[in-house]
Amino acid sequence: MKTKILNPQIIIKAASIISGKPINVIRGKSRASSVVAVRDLCIKLCKDNLFVADRDIAVPFGKDRSSVCIALKRVEKNLDQREQYRLLLDQVKGELNL
């Protein structure tokens, strides 16, 4: 099996495949809750697997560092409270072979 090098674009693509949301929508400025949920999960996966600064995570999403910090807090809260959210995270991880 060929090893993939993980980067934000690959994470976003995997989330797009699983969620059915287009890549440009995930990376865009949409505030629809379904899009924000997918975007937040992508940010969490970047933080957990890429080991880069929040500022570097923010760039592919067109956000700033503080938006990444807020997204990380929001995703932890949602993971604790929502089973569907955890399932979505697990499916994206599966798509990425993590």
Image: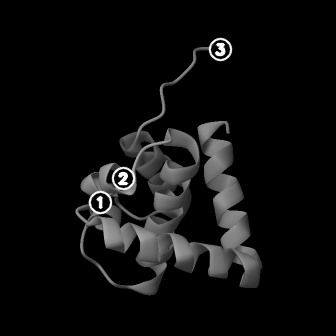
Q: Nearer the viewer, mark 2 or mark 1?
A: 2
Disc 3 marks which amino acid? Met
Disc 1 marks which amino acid? Phe
Check the image and report above or below for 96 versus 17: above
Q: Quick check: marks 1 and 3 in contact, CB under 8 Å?
A: no
Task: For mark 2, give the secondary structure.
Answer: helix
Disc on the earlier residue, 3 or 2: 3
Q: Which residue has dot 1 on it?
A: 61
Check the image and report above or below for 62 versus 5: below
In the rendering, at what x and y percent does residue 93 appear?
65, 48
Task: For mark 1, give the secondary structure.
Answer: helix
Q: Quick check: marks 3 and 2 in contact, CB under 8 Å?
A: no
Give the residue at x 56% y 42%: 49
What is the CA distance from the residue labelled 2 to the residue labelled 1? 8 Å
If the image is split into quadrants, where does the N terminus sit?
A: top right
In the rendering, at what x and y percent does residue 32 appear?
38, 85
Q: Which mark is residue 89?
A: none
Check the image and report above or below for 51 versus 60: above
Disc 2 marks which amino acid? Ile
Disc on the earlier residue, 1 or 3: 3
Give the residue at x 57% y 18%: 3
Residue neighbourhood size for the residue with mark 1, other residues' Cα within 10 Å, grouped as few (<14), some (14–19), many (≥20): many
Q: Report the side of 50 relative to 22 (left or right).
A: right
Residue 80 found in image quarter: bottom right
Q: Nearer the viewer, mark 3 or mark 2?
A: 2
Residue neighbourhood size for the residue with mark 2, other residues' Cα within 10 Å, grouped as few (<14), some (14–19), many (≥20): many
Between 25 and 57, the residue placed more toward the observer is: 57
In the rendering, at what x and y percent does residue 83 appear?
77, 77
Q: Which residue has dot 3 on it?
A: 1
In the rendering, at what x and y percent does residue 67 appear?
34, 73
Give the residue at x 47% y 62%: 20
Q: Which mark is residue 57?
A: 2
